[in-house]
Image (spheres, rainbow, N blue to C red):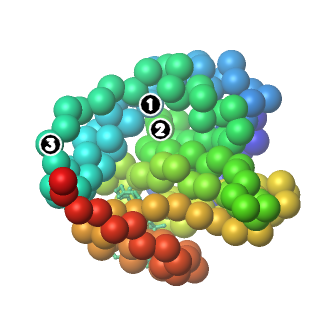
Amino acid sequence: MAIRRINPRIAKDEIEILTFTANNRDAAKAIYPKLVGMIKEFNKDQLGYFKKAFKVNTDDWSPTEEWFLTGLDNGFYLIPLVNGEPAGMLNGEFNNDGGVKYLDINTVFVLPQYQRRNIGRTMFLIAKDMGKVEGRQVIFLTVYANNPNAIKFYESVGLRPARIHMVGNI
Ligand SMILES: CC(C)(COP(=O)(O)OP(=O)(O)OC[C@H]1O[C@@H](n2cnc3c(N)ncnc32)[C@H](O)[C@@H]1OP(=O)(O)O)[C@@H](O)C(=O)NCCC(=O)NCCS
């Protein structure tokens, strides 16, 4: 399991970023129980944006270990640890679209108490490096239009809008 240490803004905290791929599936399985609560919170947060953006009502969904592990089939997880405890997640997936090989970022979050400490940016840079190693030309993700902080974050790491999803109710 690759580990990268990052220089935190608050020096007393030890921050490191773990990388999980299909090669260390067992280690990913072992850490999953520690992530469930965080993933549920993130999903609840995203569901809020989804309901507002799509103007629909839908039930909450609970992550399962099986769902989590499918993230390794064609991709990887980055898990930041603050003083040994998980503090967020990034899931990247290697995909192809019309002959273009791209890196899809499916999930990015950092627990509220650890935000604005460069953890998100560092995960993003590691993901980009991994994409480069896999020969990807493009990084791609979707973000809710009503989540301006996430949009500012993506802009700060060099992304720009390229495709707009249009929705309407039936
Ligand atoms: C978006 C998110 C992952 C950013 O993680 P983070 O670790 O706080 O981000 P960083 O500390 O690396 O920030 C890097 C830069 O992004 C920008 N940025 C990050 N959060 C921001 C915010 N809330 N408002 C404005 N700019 C922001 C800033 O330019 C920041 O640099 P600075 O702190 O020097 O000003 C985090 O806020 C989060 O988990 N949000 C909730 C979940 C979510 O919406 N995820 C995106 C789903 S598509």
Q: Position of residue 91 (x, y in %)?
A: 57, 46
Q: Quadrant of ligand 1?
A: bottom left
Residue at which label 2 appears: 86
Mark 1 Cα within 10 Å, few/some/many (few <14, many 20+)?
some
Vertical side of 164 occupied by 59: above or below: above
Instruction: Kindly tell me whether mark 3's CB lies below 8 Å from ligand 1.
Output: no
Q: Amino acid at mark 2?
A: Pro
Expressed as whole percent of the image width and height from the top left, the position of residue 58 reads 19, 38
**Of residues 53 and 20, which is closer to you in this image?**
53
Residue on which disc 1 sits: 35
Q: Which residue is mark 3?
A: 57
How many badges with numbers are in the image? 3
Tell me: is circle 2 under 8 Å from ligand 1.
no
Classed neighbour count for the residue bearing mark 2: other residues with Cα under 10 Å, few (<14), some (14–19), many (≥20): many
* Number of the front mark, 3 or 2: 3
Give the residue at x 71% y 39%: 74
Q: Is residue 87 left or right of residue 166?
A: right
Question: Callout 1: helix, strand or loop?
Answer: helix
Q: Is residue 33 above or below residue 94?
A: above
**Observer-nearest residue: 114 or 163?**
163
Do tag 2 and tag 1 residues touch (Cβ < 8 Å)? yes
Q: Which of marks 1 and 2 precedes in the sequence?
A: 1
Type of amino acid under label 3: Asn
